[in-house]
Image (cartoon, rainbow, N blue to C red):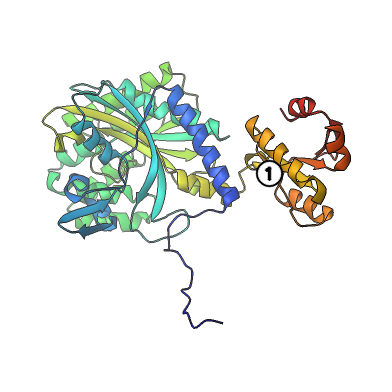
Amino acid sequence: MTDKKLVTPRKLQGFWELMPNEEMMFENMLSKLKVVFENNCFLPLDTPVAEYSDILLAKSGGDLDKEIYRFTKGNNDICLRYDLTVPLARFVAMNYNVLEFPFKRFQIGKVYRGERPQKGRFREFYQCDADVIGIENLPLSYDAECIKLYEPCFNAIGLDCVIEISNRKILAGFFESLNKQDKMIDLMIVVDKIDKLPKEEIFVMLKDLGLTEVDIENLFAIISTKGNFQEIKEKIEKITDNVEYQNGIKELETVDKYLKLMNMKDGSFLYNLAIVRGHNYYTGTVFEAYIKGKRSLGAIGGGGRYDNLCGNFIDQNMQGVGMSIGITRLFDILRSENMFDNCQNLGTMVGIITFDETFDAGIRLMASLRNDGFKADRIGEGKSFKAKMKEANRRNIPFVIILGEDEVKNQTYTLKVMQTGEQMTLTYDDLKKKLK
């Protein structure tokens, strides 16, 4: 025994850690999404996890500021990124002279928010983003392209989605018509909580911000509106003739046109004017993504247009729009809702069982199979044959090769298909064909 004091192994609450089999499932999910982004002509990008605080806080605000991890190291004031969009804006500003525009990029990486850990919410989690940055004038067709991108992303992992869409100019114009520009951020924060708090509580919060009962009734008439574009237009277009308000409606109409041109499936998108998104850098189109038929699980993605984000870093009019998937949250939902396949073939494909006298031959076989592209591994070394087969079952290995003295002498291999119990003796060339 030793007098050494042992440290209790533990990890920070809300931080991400998976078992190896789950990590394989997660990585498989990411690889499918990367293919979708590449097929839609988005380029890969990676940016640092840590940024200078004045960069990351250039345009955040609201409740988000309270969640940011911020610290000093030497003379440097540093924040951990809370999303991937602001670092993108910084990257584009720094590399403006060498990038081709519109610049389309995707990025999958960890972000950090110091919120209270709870089901579906983490302090460390992955985001999966795709954005388009343009100069001077970025057509609204790119807003539709980012919304449309959810369809193949969800389909790639065996899901259907519904995207709820709005435009922040509608509410901004409404609040402007009430001369509440100075309370705009606070009002947007309250609206963003519409699905989280009782209507009576929202009513009190709005009244505290200076809205009259008539104002609040008109606001609820707007944010309770859902449906196709024509339905929402008929219900809200006459509430105010404010220019910003009317521009928001016109932009939604244009986005609706492009979504239909891009063959967005019926039932996969609708307009919900309560959608504002929590980040203050959004200036126009905003949207949130839900698993079809499971809206109660909450949004697992969202995004929108940010016409002046890069303006914090460069004296150049640059417009952007992007979509994001909360990939950690989505994975956690799929796992907890038993919506995942077992993905049993993601790990070892071929297990090799040897005996004392065939151990060296098993090493050679493993190396040959790996060189030919098969995930092969020795199993159960030092155990009985029965224990080796149990291990193969426990690890969900689909194929097992039994290598005895006769097989080595005859240069053959006994292959067992674990799912069916079928067993056959093959040459190496026939073995490769069977495994393929």
Farthest right residue in view: 406
Left/right placement of residue 266 relative to residue 233 reads right
Is residue 214 at all visible to an observer of this figure? no
Which of the 4 quarters of the picture holds residue 45?
top left
Left/right placement of residue 55 relative to residue 9 reads left
Q: Position of residue 218 (x, y in %)?
A: 26, 42
79 up-or-down from 35: above or below? below
Amino acid on which disc 1 is placed: Asp
What is the total number of numbered labels drawn onto the structure image?
Answer: 1
Task: Name the residue rendered at 49%, 48% in the picture.
Answer: 296
Q: Position of residue 298 (x, y in %)?
A: 45, 47
Label 1 CA crowd tier, 10 Å (few <14, some 14–19, many 20+): many
Q: Position of residue 309 (x, y in %)?
A: 20, 36
Q: Which residue is mark 1?
A: 377
223 up-or-down from 122: above or below? above
Asked whether 7 or 355 is in front, the reply is 355
348 up-or-down from 8: above or below? above
Is residue 313 at all visible to an observer of this figure? yes
Asked whether 232 or 275 is in front, the reply is 275
Left/right placement of residue 397 relative to residue 333 reads right
Which quadrant of the rendered structure holds the C terminus?
A: top right
Farthest top residue in view: 261
Asked whether 103 or 358 is in front, the reply is 358
Which quadrant of the rendered structure holds the N terminus?
A: bottom right
Left/right placement of residue 304 relative to residue 227 reads left
Which of the 4 quarters of the picture holds residue 129?
top left
Q: Position of residue 328 (x, y in %)?
A: 46, 47
SS of the residue under disc 1: strand
272 up-or-down from 21: above or below? above
Task: Name the residue rendered at 74%, 28% in the picture.
Answer: 432
